[in-house]
Amino acid sequence: MNELLDDLLQRWEQAFNDIHLIDHYKNQVNTIKYADGSRYDISKFDRASFPSGGSMIDDSSGLEHAEKYKYGFDETGLPCYVCFGHVYNKVNWEGFYTYTDNEVKYLEFCLNTGVPSEFTRIVFQDGRKVLLQRLVVNGRGSGYPHLSPQERVDTLKNDESSFFITVISFKYEANRISRSSSIHITPGLGKYTTYDEYTYGESEVLDSIRTFFENGSSQLSYYRNEANLDSTTLINKLASAMADAIVEVLIHQNIQSPIAFLELYYHLGDNYRPLLSWQSAQDIEDKMQRGDIPFINDKYGGPKVDITSFEDLFALLEQMMQENDDMQLGSVMLRKACTILTESKLFGKIPVSEDFAAYAIDWSIEGHSDEELEEILLECGVKQDVITLWRQKGMFI
């Protein structure tokens, strides 16, 4: 696998010379459609279909105030060209797709820097997918605009936080994938390996994929939506299960004083398995006397929630977020779970204060203003009169 990793890095570096090909594929465009987010993830491509992964529209006028993705399709109906940009930052990207009998590829460039911001390649053998190589540059290649191309390459390759990389090798039994082996590089985690095991039902339809990690743990990474649950039903079922599991965790903690605030810390976009932390009324009073924001718990590293009993629902939600390009679904689910916990006061199983509240938040990007924090608290089941009382006490900034 390390050889395939080195091969990918070499192909990415060589791709700096391919930016001139953008015009070639732009000239092949026969029809144009628009989207409010990224579509046509080439890792989903197979010889039978290429799902868009979200809605597409013919008229872009309704996307004037959103990130607008413009997709061009060739005469066969396959996407061949894409462009998008950040209006405020004035950073733009263009990319193209290529198709041959043995390989499909997506290559994307940051036009401001000339950096290949994404290089994804799938290799086919006898019509079967046998290899996937994907490299995405952190920040999509918009950094270091002042450097020369070679300096940019050297800087990115020497920075361990530069790349999100995945290389997957697929193995087959009876003309279906039975197992895959992967090597990854992720900022903050470094290099690690995983492997997936595929399970099929009686109708030969893929039922599930389980991912195994180096430390021996595993998680369900795909589960077939056999019951055809829509997003609302799935979120409600998962929020209820999550609330039950959170209370079960708290029951086994040595909690000495009634809980006033229960925080579910998650990371928007990639981790919706919350870390729990809590504060008593005295903790909050002490913080206010010090001039600290009472809602931010400074005692992180609390217990995680065991999702084993409902990991099938959790896997479905992660799939739905990816398929719909809507990472907010995870936030909605966690805040519905908080509403259940807030309104039930932890089902009466653990002592809480009179104005107890549970809330789910990613402090790195949310809750930075009183207005935004208040909106989050309302979404978590806190009543407006309670928030008004907290404001009178000076608990907001």
Image: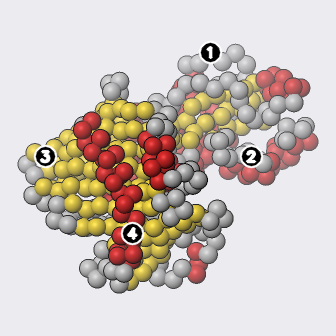
Tag in front: 4 or 1:
4
Horizontal and vertical percent for residue 367? 72, 46
Figure check: 306 above or below 129: above
- Examine the rendering and report whether any part of residue 333 can be seen: no
What type is the residue that disc 3 sits on? Tyr
Which residue is labeled 4 in the image?
Answer: 20
Q: Amino acid at mark 2?
A: His
Q: Residue at horizontal 35%, vertical 84%?
A: 30
**Disc 3 to disc 1, C-alpha distance:** 49 Å
The amino acid type, in three-letter code, at marker 4 is: His
Q: CA distance from mark 2 to mark 4?
A: 42 Å
Q: State the CA–CA distance, disc 3 to disc 4.
A: 38 Å
Asked whether residue 154 appears in the rendered view, the answer is yes
Upstream in the sequence, badge 4 or badge 1? 4
* Residue beneath disc 1: 254
Using the rendered view, name the quadrant where residue 286 is placed: top right
| Spot occupied by residue 237 in the image (x, y as percentages of width and height) | 48, 47
Quote the CA–CA distance across marks 3 and 2. 49 Å
What residue is drawn where x is 42% and y is 81%? 32
Residue occupied by mark 3: 172
Question: Which residue bears the numbered disc 2?
Answer: 368
The kind of secondary structure element at disc 1 is loop
**Where, quadrant-wise, is the C terminus in this rendering?**
top right
